Every structure is written in C-alpha cells, then in structure tokens.
Image (cartoon, rainbow, N blue to C red):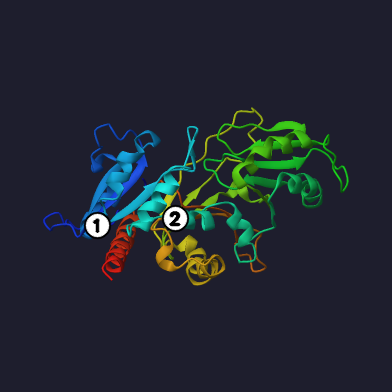
Amino acid sequence: MNETADTPTIADNSSRPPVGRVALVWRGDPNAQPPAPSATRFRLIFQALDAVGLAGEPVLYSEDAEEQVRSRLLAVDGVLVWVNPFDAGKDRSRLDPLLREVAARGIWVSARPDVILKMGVKEVLYNTRTLGWGADTDLYPSVDDFHRRFPARLAASGPRVVKQNRGNGGQGVWKVELAADVGPSPEPGTPVRVLHALRGSVPEDLALGAFMRRCEPYFAGGGRIIDQAFAPRLPEGMIRCYLTQSRVVGFGHQLIKALVAPPASGVPEPPGPRIMHPPDAPPFRTLRDKMEAEWVPAMQRLLDISTASLPALWDADFLYGPKAQDGSDTYVLCEINVSSVAPYPDSAAPKVAEAALAGVRAAVAASNR
C-alpha cells in the first residue's frame, strides 16, 4: 500500500500480555499453514493491534471448513472481516449468518452483516439521495417496476448508470445510453449502447429490452436495481474517502477507467494507480469537513446506525459533481464499501486498532453485566 505521507510510527507493545484477541478474516484455505502476519496485506493492522495490546490472529475462511472457522471465531474477543460480496463464484450467504451468531455471543464484529445491509449496498445511494452527497437516483424493487419505468427514465434524463444492489469489482454496474433520440417512450427494440464496469469491458450495442432482461437476475433473492445519472466528470477520477467509524482516516485518488469508453484502438486502458493521502491532505479538506460534520452524522440518523456500530474501516467513493457557482468542486457519492476495504492508506491502521480495542472493551463490559 503506497501513501504520499510518511508511514505512521507504531509502538512495539510485544512485551506486554495482550488484553484481547482479534481475528482478521479473509478467504483462503483454513487447512493451509497460517500466513505470517508480516507477510500479509494486513501487516500494518496486525502491528497496530499489537501496539494497543490486542493479539491479531489470521483466520482463513472457506465454506468447506465452516465449523472450524466458527470454533476459532467463538474463541476470540473481536473479529475484523475482509470478504467480498462476490468472489470467484462465491458469496457471503453462509458467512453472514455465522458472523451474526458470533456477534450474538457477545463478540465484537466489524462490520456486522446488518450494518452492511444498511450502508454497504447500492440502495444506500437511494436512501441517502437527499443528503449533500446525493444525485439524481432511482430504485427499482422488482423486475416489473424496472421494465415499466426505466425506459422513460433513460429517455428523459440521458445516460444512466445501472447498479445491482450488492456487488464488487464493477460486477453488475453498467453505463446505458440511447443510441439515438427516440422520443419519451423507448420500445424494447430501441438500440442502446452499454458498457460494463468490469475491467476490460468494451461498449456493446444491443436492444434495450435485451439489456433489461440481462439485468433480471439482479432481482433474485430480494435484490433490486439502483440507477444514477452518469457523472460527466468521471474521467477526472474517483476520490475514495476512508473512515474509521465516523472519522476520516485517509483518502485515495485514482483515474479510473470503468465506464469510460476505450480509445479509438478499442483496447481498454488499465486504471491509473490509486494515490493515497493522509486525512489532512489539503486537496480534500472540504470533503473531509463535509463528511465528518454533515454527511456521516446525517446518514447515521437516516439509517439508524450508532457510531459504535459503524465499521472499523469503510470507504465512500465520490465522483466530481458539477462545479459550484464560486468554481469550487462538488461531490457525488457513487458507492460505499464495507465488506472488504483494501487497499487502504497506511494512516488508517492505528485508527482501526483503536476502534477494535474500544469495541472489544465494550463487548467485554456488556458480557460482565
């Protein structure tokens, strides 16, 4: 993980006995030799946990070894989780009930599945659309509603970005635009151009009805579709604002290529590097102030999420919105990531450890009542 600021110094606390144990969970083979913490991408978090008196333990998750993983999680005081909603054909349908069980036993878990379902899905874009980070956003709770309303929406407001409710890595995120002006009521046969946000995708021309049928699986299992107006300033990059609970702990700026048409050669360009910045980086001071003083507290009230329940590490992805009258930038939220936030700035690690320590202490105190 690269960062423009110096890596924060983490004190060596290894001579003291740990005040608790925290499992760091990610996908892998539980029967394999556990990786050395110093050799993982969570190296700084392991160090930061040690510095506050917590012993970090790698726990590799697999559905095939669920009982083994359950036993390990029930033996620790806290759990930090990095597992994507979808990964190589696997999902969290078995992990989330396990985490709920662990939390019900009085063990601190970040992030809890019920919190993920409130803020870590695309529906949050619709539910918080009236906040200062909102944009022109709609929600379709069923296949019938999508087929009934989306064509007119597309014709009335220009290119849209259609998003399945839960996903990662650009899966189920599409830019959709009419290939020609067809009036206010496009038909199923109306030609559209679509571009998937998955890396390496190229524009595709097909009928509107065919595209909408392609999206129907997104409604399975109570799923839904959210769509937003396409942000014209997308080529200027995405700002990832990293937070520990309600406080900003860093930023990442990246020139993304998802939903940007490839050059004339037709070969998609790779995204630019994500440049990490500390939380006090001057270019993002206004965004930090907005997040901490206005938008995050408003989101908490709207979604009924206490500060203690906010994830120890999460991020909000912003695109640049229209320039304000004074020429300053505005920002549009395009996604919140909670399930598996990586990479992250080095400045985040000590704050994650502090949140873990507070969560473990609160859970222990509650169990002793």
How far across and down, in percent of the image, does residue 354 sit? 30, 62
How far across and down, in percent of the image, does residue 130 sit? 64, 66
How far across and down, in percent of the image, does residue 253 sit? 49, 51
Q: Quadrant of the N terminus?
A: top left
Of the pair 8 and 300, the residue shown nearer to us: 300
The Cα atoms of the two marked residues, 1 and 2, are separated by 22 Å
| Apparent side of residue 340 relative to residue 154 in the rendered image (left or right) | left
| Apparent side of residue 60 relative to residue 202 in the rendered image (left or right) | left
Q: Secondary structure at mark 2?
A: strand
Q: Is residue 60 visible?
A: no
Count of numbered badges drawn on the protein: 2
Categorize mark 2 by other alpha carbons within 10 Å: few (<14), some (14-19), many (20+).
many
Using the image, tell me which numbered label, if any, was put on residue 89: none
| Apparent side of residue 121 relative to residue 266 in the rendered image (left or right) | left
Q: Amino acid at mark 2?
A: Trp
Query: In which quarter of the view is residue 282 placed?
Result: bottom left
Circle nearer the viewer, 1 or 2: 2
Q: Return the residue at label 1.
A: 9
| Apparent side of residue 207 relative to residue 333 in the rendered image (left or right) | right
Of the pair 271 and 66, the residue shown nearer to us: 66
How far across and down, in percent of the image, does residue 2 sit? 37, 46
Question: What residue appears at the point 56 percent right and 41 percent down from the top-left corner?
Answer: 170
Q: Return the residue at label 2.
A: 314
Question: What residue appears at the point 50 percent right and 32 percent down from the top-left corner?
Answer: 89
Question: What residue appears at the point 80 percent right and 47 percent down from the top-left corner?
Answer: 148
Q: Residue furthest left?
A: 15
Q: Secondary structure at mark 1?
A: loop
Categorize mark 1 by other alpha carbons within 10 Å: few (<14), some (14-19), many (20+).
few
Q: Is residue 297 visible?
A: yes
Q: Amino acid at mark 1?
A: Thr
- Badge 1 or badge 2: first in the primary sequence: 1
Q: Quadrant of the C terminus?
A: bottom left
